[in-house]
Image (spheres, rainbow, N blue to C red):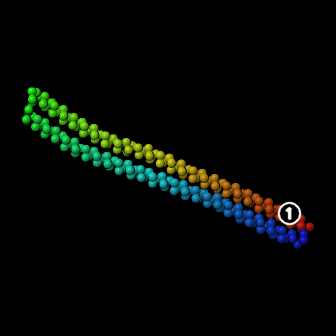
Amino acid sequence: MGAAAAPLMAVGAVVSYVGAQREAQAQRMAAESAIAMGKYNAQVDVNNMVAEQNDIRYRESALTLKKNQELQKAEFGRQDLEKKNRRALAQARVSMPSFGGTYSDVLRSAEKASYDNLAKFDFATSQETAGLSGQIADTNRQLGYAYQRGMSNRDLTLRTAANTAVQFRNQASQTSLAGTASLFSGLGSAAAASQ
């Protein structure tokens, strides 16, 4: 059996070696694929971050528009209130029912009421727009957070892909080494069997 089996053992060793080398090559290709997929997924992470930031910027612009509209509406309302106050003061000057007070007391009282009305209006307007201003200011924090989260996701994706590629490369190296060892072992066995 020795001399006849030797060529078959040599052929089997070579076939085993070639198969191991092909498997090692496939694992190296899988490593490159893992890197490519990691780059792709990292770009998806960046694209998602940009989309989230665009959504935040859109909300910011909508809030800014709403605030500007509220301020414009308030400006018209304030002008109307000032006209109403001037009419009330003019009527107070004309009618003059002092009820024991002087003319200047009545006018001072009407002016004070006018200023109080304007102050109340201005305070209400500032309260309405302060909330919008706070939300607008918060968008900067949200933009920064979205950026940090997106870049962290990208970095994690790239590191995971690199780790996967290293594992594939290590497997390829082990497979190639095992194939080489199997080849030498098989050839050695074939040489011993042929003698």
Q: Along the horizontal axis of the image, is 70 left or right of 32? A: left
Residue drawn at the location 16% of the way across and 41% of the way down:
84
Q: Along the horizontal axis of the image, is 72 left or right of 56? A: left
Q: How many marks?
A: 1
Height in image: 115 above or below 154? above
- Viewer can see residue 81: yes
Q: x, y percentage for residue 154? A: 54, 52
Of residues 15 and 124, which is closer to you in this image? 124
- The outermost residue toward the bottom is 4
Residue drawn at the location 67% of the way across and 63% of the way down:
26
Of residues 85 and 161, which is closer to you in this image? 85
- The outermost residue toward the right is 195
Q: Count residues near mark 1 (Cα–Cα under 10 Å), then give few for <14, some for 14-19, many for 20+.
A: some
Q: x, y percentage for residue 23? A: 70, 63
Q: x, y percentage for residue 167? A: 67, 55
- Viewer can see residue 102: no
Residue drawn at the location 38% of the way across and 44% of the way down:
135
Q: Along the horizontal axis of the image, is 175 left or right of 149? A: right
Dot 1 lies on which element? helix
Judging by the rendered image, the residue that carries numbered circle 1 is: 188
Q: Quadrant of residue 85?
A: top left
Residue drawn at the location 55% of the way across and 58% of the way down:
40
Height in image: 13 above or below 169? below
- The outermost residue toward the front is 99
Q: x, y percentage for residue 123? A: 27, 38
Of residues 128 and 163, which is closer to you in this image? 128
* Placement of the N terminus among the 4 image quadrants: bottom right
Q: Which amino acid does the dot numbered 1 rest on?
A: Gly
Q: Quadrant of residue 128?
A: top left
Height in image: 60 above or below 112? below
* Placement of the C terminus among the 4 image quadrants: bottom right
